[in-house]
Each structure stands twice: as C-alpha cells, then as structure tokens.
C-alpha cells in the first residue's frame, strides 16, 4: 500500500499509438484529460533543433520531421517507414533476429550499445543522441505523470502500468526501468486484457451469482492479446492468455501503404520508398482511410505534391482493404483457439466476447470473430480506448487500500525453464500458471567434482532451448565435490505479481542454501544505466521548462507589441494621443517587431527585457487614453 506522503497511485495504459491515465476519485475512476482536453495522448516523442516534444505537439510536427519522430510502441513489419519502433526494441538485444530483420525496414539509424543493447539515434539541438527504448518510453510515462499531477494538484510517485499479456520477462523488466527513469515507482505491472476485464466487470456488474466466462479480444495498434477470465463476485481469475506482439493496426496500415506505393509507381513511374517524408504523409492519409472504411464501403485518398510535385488521388473500397489484410485478420483466430484450449473451455462456455483496442472497430475483424462464435453478439459497450487505463486505475486503488471488493488472479503468459544437458528446454513453470507462483525442480551436476553449476534461463514454448527467448543465466556456487549426477540441486523459480522472475537454489544433501546471481539478463538496464538515464531525464525536464519560459516570454512580447500597435491605429480612440507620442509608440513597436523577427531563438531574459523596454515607452502614453 502506498504511504500517505507518496500521494495517489495512478493507472497508466502505455499504449501502442495512444496512452491514457486514470485515477480513483470519489469512489469511481476518473480518466484524466491532457492539456489539449483529450482523454488520450499520442505515444509520440519528437526531437528538433530547438526542443523535445511529447504527445499532441509531437504528432502535429510529425510530417515535417519524420526521422526524428519516435512512436513509442509501434510494431512495423512490412514497409519502410519514418518513425521509430521502441516497443519492438524494448527488452531486446541488437543481435536479436527480430531486431536485425526490422532494421532493414527502418529509415533511421539503430546501433549496438553496451551489452549488445540496440540504441535509437536521433538529432536533438544539432547533436546526435543515442537513446534506449526505455528512455523513449519513459518520456511518455513522464508526460502521463505530468497530466495526472496537473489534475490532482500534487506530486505523483506511484503507478500501475499495463503491458501486452504476451510481454516476456525482459520486456516487463524494461517497462519497470522506463517507469524508474520517469520518476515513477511502478508498483504493479498488469496485463492489458486483465485491466480491460476489470473495466468490463465493474461496468457490466458481471460479478453475479454463478459468474461468467469472458473472452477479452484486444487488438490494438501494434499488439494483439486474447485472455479468458472467470468473473465471479468481484474475483477476476485469468484462465489462459495468448497473443502476438507483432500484430496490430499498424500491420494493416502497412499493407495499405504498400498498395498505394505500388499504385503510385504504376501511375507515375516513381518510387517513393526512399523518401521518409512522402511515406509519412502517405501513412497518415492511409490511417485516415482505414478509419473511414470502418463506417463506409469506399474511401478517397488525396495528397497534394506527394512526391516530386506530383499529386496523388485515388480510392479504395472496403472489400479491397479486406483482401489486402485477409491473412492477418484470419491470424487473429489462432490465439483465440489456443486460449480456449488452454482454459479448457469450448465456444459455448464463453458468456461474453469483449472487444478492446481501436483495430476491433474493423467490420471484417468483428465478422470473423462473430462467425467463429457461431453468430454470438460481441460486447462493444465499454470504451475501447479507455478501458485498459480504467482497469489500471482500479488496480491502483486496490494498492492504495481504496477498493476491497476486487481480487485479481493473473497468469504467466509463457513457460519458463532452463537448458538441460542436451540443449532441450526443461520447463519449470508452464505457461498460464497463476501468479504469483513458486515452483521447484531437481537438477544435478554434469562433471565429477563440479562445484559451480550454470543454468541458462529461457522463456517460451519451443522444445529446443535456443529457439526460445533467452533471459539470462544464474550460477549456483559452493556445490560439494562429488561424482557427476550425485549432488541434488533444487532450483526454485519464483514469479511475482508483476510477472517478473526471481531465482533461488539449494544443495539438498547439506541443506545449505547458496546465493544465485542472475547475469546477462536480456535487455535489462543496470542500476548505473538507470541512474544515468534519470539524470538525462532531469536534464530534458529542465530544458523543456526553459524552452517553455522562452516561448512564454516571446509570446508575451509579441502579444503586447501587436496589442499596442492595434490600439494606436484604432481611429476610434487614437485621436486622444498627441501625434508626436503616437509616432514614438509606433516606432517603438516597429523596432520591437523587427527585433522579434530576427531573434526568434533569443533567451527568455532577452524577451522579457525587450517587453519591459517597450512597456516603459508605451504605457505612460497609452495611459492618457484612460
């Protein structure tokens, strides 16, 4: 439970394309609006020669600065695009096959950093910056924290953050690291479908006698999750989860962009693949077309001067869009079937199918899912954009001791185990095991008089260990010398409520417990790296505040100058000012505006000095009109 001096715990949905923050207030969840009045904020960070932008401001300049505009959690698989993919990099190594494959599609630079960690390269204030995916994610988390603090009027230190259900251990660790960099104590990480189920349960009053089996179908911008839960009298128990962290709305956009690129090539004999700005404009237009096709059977696409001065106008039907993406749409059923199998339920045992995520608005996705469940009506009544943040805020209230009638029981999405002698995966904790969980398994030595045993730890479902996701390795020291296979080693895997793994070990013959050190954890930041990034985040914050002061001072000078100019030029009142004084004011205003035009990057103190100088000249004269 958070201490009273630590303020309220907030719930954050760190989404693929949009993020959302909520808090428990007056016995209900309040979804907090940002400074633009929107209840969701684009998960975008942009860097320019003068400033760092987050959210709406970053999105607004995206077309002009595509290479330095970073979408925090996009899953891009097909075509060259002009914004970075932090989600695909989070918790991964530079040499990871997925990273290497995706790098071929990215127009921006990704380099190998310390411990083989991929780093995104951007240009900021004329300098090259190398940023880890956790740093980019932390900037959006920091923005959500700011939004909450502005609403609450107090400092926020604690948060519940949601992640895709199929995030592995490394990616969950990386999300916690991102929170730390943002100055947040991530008290709990919960799966997005579980959070959505809470929103469904509390809004639909699903906690009825007898309970309900609910399938959450969460298809967002970059990830896809399916979870089956049993909801009964405030108890939310996850039975099984499945998904694909490389499937979402961005993949549908990619197919459409590729289609339009080929059409432009056929019509105009020009290839826009190598031009990031043209591709960014085409992608933005394609996203709008996709949304239109959810409510219309045909949509128009028009972009002036798309490439080399050529205008591009075309149409696409819903049927053509569905044809382009049919294989991806059908792929959505495999996790559904897997989830039902693991939960040991048939289709008829599912009481409600709940749609979450913007991509579930696509009619064909709904039709395929409805047909799979033999025409069952799909539940679309909860807010698809806010449900995950709603559930996170409820979990935050539980941790704060404000909600007592809700109990969450989640599962681990992937199996955990170690590499045994022949390279096969020895499973210790099977997937869909309820968390928290603690399981033990016996092992032994491979050589005579072996005193140190190393266990590579993997996460995944493949029979060969190397085909799974490598998490790291732990070392057990101090094993008593003995012939091979005589010592009995008990290894304990312990998963906490965040789905994060801890390991301990014991040599059974002596009962002596030895320390276990987790080393080389994939994608995990060291304490020193986190502290360094926290320092960088504070530096960014200070620079952002200084930039805001400079902009405010510039706007104040500009507004005052034009206000005075309009006043002295107003024929209804300017007769009250002597001609000589009027000229004096006009000249001072002209000089101030001239200076402004040539000193747009001046410091706040300079703008303030110029404004006070102009005020000292104009105010005494203008006061005569009163």
Image (spheres, grey):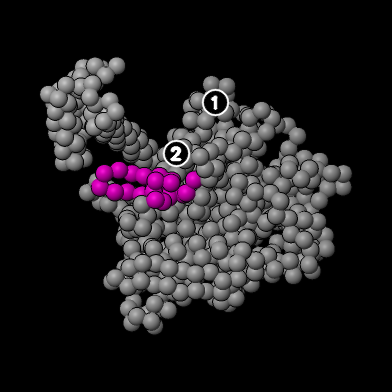
Q: Which residue: 52% across, 30% down?
A: 151
User: Would residue 51 be counted in the magenta stretch?
Assistant: yes
**Residue 279 appears in which quarter of the rendering?**
bottom left
Residue occupying the far right of the picture:
209
Q: Residue at x 36, y 41 (%)?
A: 533
Q: Is residue 554 above or below residue 87?
A: above
Q: 573 and 210: which one is in front?
A: 573
- For residue 142, which numbered disc appears in the image? 2
Give neighbour class at mark 2: few <14, some 14-19, many 20+ (Cα, 10 Å): many
Q: Is residue 579 above or below residue 174?
A: above
Q: Position of residue 185 (x, y in %)?
A: 51, 35
Image coordinates for residue 338, horizontal then vertical, percent:
69, 65
In the image, 577: left or right of 470? left
Which residue is the site of mark 1? 7
Is 126 in front, or is 232?
126
Instruction: Look at the image and say whether residue 550 sits in the magenta stretch.
Output: no
- Quadrant of image for the C terminus: top left
Q: Is residue 118 visible?
A: no
Residues at marks 1 and 2, CA–CA distance in whole angstroms: 16 Å
Give the magenta part as a residue range. Answer: 41-60
- Category of crowding for the residue at label 1, using alpha-carbon neighbours closer than 10 angstroms: few (below 14), some (14–19), many (at least 20): some
Residue occupying image coordinates x 53% and y 58%: 221
The quadrant where residue 31 appears: top right
């Amino acid at each position: 439970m958070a201490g009273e001096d630590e303020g309220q715990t907030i719930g954050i949905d760190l989404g693929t394309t949009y993020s959302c923050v909520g808090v428990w207030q007056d016995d209900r969840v309040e979804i907090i609006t940002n400074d633009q009045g929107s209840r969701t904020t684009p998960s975008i960070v942009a860097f320019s020669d003068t400033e760092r932008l987050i959210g709406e401001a970053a999105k607004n300049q995206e077309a002009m600065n595509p290479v330095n505009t970073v979408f925090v959690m996009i899953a891009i698989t097909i075509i060259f695009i002009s914004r970075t993919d932090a989600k695909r990099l989070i918790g991964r190594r530079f040499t990871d096959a997925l990273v290497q494959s995706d790098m071929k599609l990215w127009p921006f630079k990704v380099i190998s950093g310390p411990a083989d960690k991929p780093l995104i390269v951007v240009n900021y204030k004329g300098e090259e910056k190398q940023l880890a995916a956790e740093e980019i994610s932390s900037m959006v988390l920091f923005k959500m924290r700011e939004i909450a603090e502005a609403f609450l009027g107090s400092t926020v230190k604690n948060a519940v953050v949601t992640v895709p259900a199929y995030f592995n251990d490394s990616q969950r660790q990386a999300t916690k690291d991102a929170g730390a960099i943002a100055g947040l104590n991530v008290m709990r990480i919960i799966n997005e479908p579980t959070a959505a189920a809470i929103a469904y349960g509390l809004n639909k009053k699903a906690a009825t006698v007898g309970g309900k089996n609910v399938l959450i179908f969460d298809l967002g911008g970059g990830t896809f999750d399916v979870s089956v839960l049993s909801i009964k009298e405030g108890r939310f128990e996850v039975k099984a989860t499945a998904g694909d962290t490389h499937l979402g709305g961005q993949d549908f956009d990619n197919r459409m962009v590729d289609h339009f690129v080929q059409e432009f090539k056929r019509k105009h004999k020009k290839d826009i693949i190598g031009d990031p700005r043209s591709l960014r404009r085409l992608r933005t237009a394609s996203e709008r077309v996709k949304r239109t096709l959810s409510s219309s059977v045909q949509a128009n696409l028009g972009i002036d001067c798309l490439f080399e001065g050529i205008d591009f106008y075309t149409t696409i039907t819903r049927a053509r869009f569905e044809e382009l993406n049919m294989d991806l749409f059908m792929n959505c059923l495999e996790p559904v079937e897997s989830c039902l199998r693991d939960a040991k339920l048939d289709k008829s045992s599912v009481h409600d199918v709940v749609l979450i995520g913007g991509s579930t608005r696509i009619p064909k996705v709904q039709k395929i899912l409805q047909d799979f469940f033999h025409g069952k009506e799909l539940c679309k009544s909860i807010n698809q954009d806010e449900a995950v943040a709603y559930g996170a805020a409820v979990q935050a209230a539980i941790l704060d001791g404000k909600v007592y009638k809700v109990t969450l029981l989640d599962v681990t999405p992937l199996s955990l185990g170690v590499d045994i002698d022949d390279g096969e995966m020895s499973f210790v904790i099977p997937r869909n095991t309820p968390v928290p969980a603690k399981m033990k398994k016996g092992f032994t030595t491979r050589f005579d008089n072996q005193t140190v045993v190393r266990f590579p730890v993997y996460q995944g479902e493949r029979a060969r260990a190397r085909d799974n996701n490598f998490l790291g390795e732990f070392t057990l020291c101090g094993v008593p010398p003995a012939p091979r296979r005589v010592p009995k080693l008990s290894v304990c895997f312990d998963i906490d409520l965040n789905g994060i793994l801890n390991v301990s070990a014991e040599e059974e013959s002596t009962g002596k417990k030895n320390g276990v050190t987790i080393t080389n954890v994939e994608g995990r930041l060291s304490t020193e790296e986190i502290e360094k990034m926290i320092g960088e985040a504070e530096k960014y914050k200070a620079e952002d505040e200084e930039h805001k002061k400079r902009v405010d001072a510039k706007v104040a000078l500009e507004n005052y100058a034009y206000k005075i100019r309009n006043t002295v030029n107003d024929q209804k009142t300017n007769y009250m000012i002597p001609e000589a004084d009027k000229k004096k004011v006009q000249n001072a205003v002209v000089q101030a505006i001239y200076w402004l035009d040539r000193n747009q990057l001046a410091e706040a103190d300079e703008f303030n000095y110029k404004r006070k100088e102009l005020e000292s000249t104009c105010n005494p004269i203008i006061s005569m009109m009163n």
